[in-house]
Amino acid sequence: MPIILIDEKTDRSAALGKYLTSTGSYRVIASSSPEVTISHALTEKPGVLIVVQDEGQNGIIFLKNLRDQKIDLPVIILACAYDTDAFCFSVANGAEYMIMDGDVDKWHPLLKQLIEKISANRQIQDKLAFLNKKLNLVGSITRHDILNQLTAVSGYTELLEMTTEDPQMRLYIEKERFAIDKIRKLLQFSKDYQNMGSEPPVWQTISSIIRRAEDLISLKGVTIKNASGTASVFADLSVEKAVAQLLDNSVRHGQTVSSINISIQEEKVGSVLVIEDNGVGIPDPDKERIFERGFGKNTGWGLFLAREILAITDMTITETGVPGNGARFEIHIPGDVYKN
């Protein structure tokens, strides 16, 4: 994948292009036209595309146009002097920002090192993306085929039950049904875990997350009281599944739960999302174990998955309720992924 260099000095760009060409490692194209540059960028590998900006331009407009068009090529902005706004915008949009003042010849080796580092990192990213794509494909095909076979097994189990009155055989059939159901749940977990973090996080209101979470489970008459207001979090798109697991845990295991209260406690930095019920609570020895993989009476994956989803944007979760007075989950949200 090519790298775009944005420079405002025509004479410096020419010397830079000549230097990079002399290394024999890069095909260099210089252009003052974004359209031409992007067209070449799609065909030249490896390549360095030098975009010559008009005098006084700092490259931000061109970078913004690239990102607005969803073009994720690596970008280096070359500046003659430090500009705080340009630097912050560059970093926020995944670009490098390099100051080249004085004799440009002394900067050429450093710039070449930066280009080599970016190229190596991008090659690693592309390889990981390729491998992840293969793993996802294998995973989805395997799950699909297993589910098809489970459907057949389930059908034959129904037929078998219709042909026998033997109590012992019916007991075995019931155990078989239980195993089939558990396999289905494990396959669903593998799908959720595989998809976790596959898309970039987005800003979402906590109220909308809770509404989506409610749609994923059966509340069985339990009332949800949401006092999160307009608070928002920067979280993975599957965050409602994490909240749904917490709600489901209360409904399934709280025994006497009739209501679940959701609130926000703002702190100096970040906040705490509190989800608490009025059930029997969680024994002290289990407060940390409930988040371990395989622990619990159902699949043993629910709260483990919830913690993993929240961790994508550095959120953490703990259970702080008093046994006998209900469960209380506290999700600690860092300041940079919370707003209200």
Image (spheres, grey):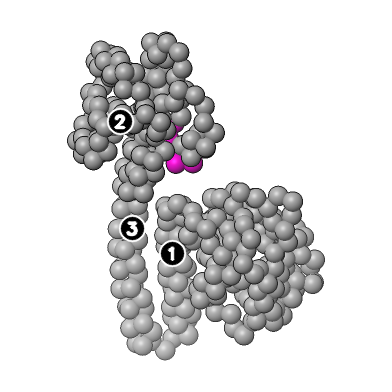
Mark 1–mark 3 CB contact (< 8 Å): no
Q: 93 left or right of 302? A: left
Relative horizontal placement of residue 262, taking residue 17 as reference (left or right): right
What crowding class fits label 2: few (fewer than 14 Cα within 10 Å), some (14-19), or many (20 or more)? many
Q: Counting other residues with Cα less than 10 Å from the Cα at mark 1, is it few (<14), some (14-19), or many (20 or more)?
A: few
Decide which of 312, 101 is in the foreground and name it. Answer: 101
Which residue has dot 3 on it?
140
**Element on which disc 2 rests:** strand
Q: Which residue is mark 1?
A: 188
Rendered image: mark on residue 51: 2
Query: Image quadrant for the N terminus?
Result: top left
20 lies above or below 282: above
Amino acid type at circle 1 is Gln
Q: Which residues are magenta?
A: 92-96
Under mark 2, the amino acid is Val
For the residues labelled 1 and 2, the Cα–Cα distance comes to 48 Å
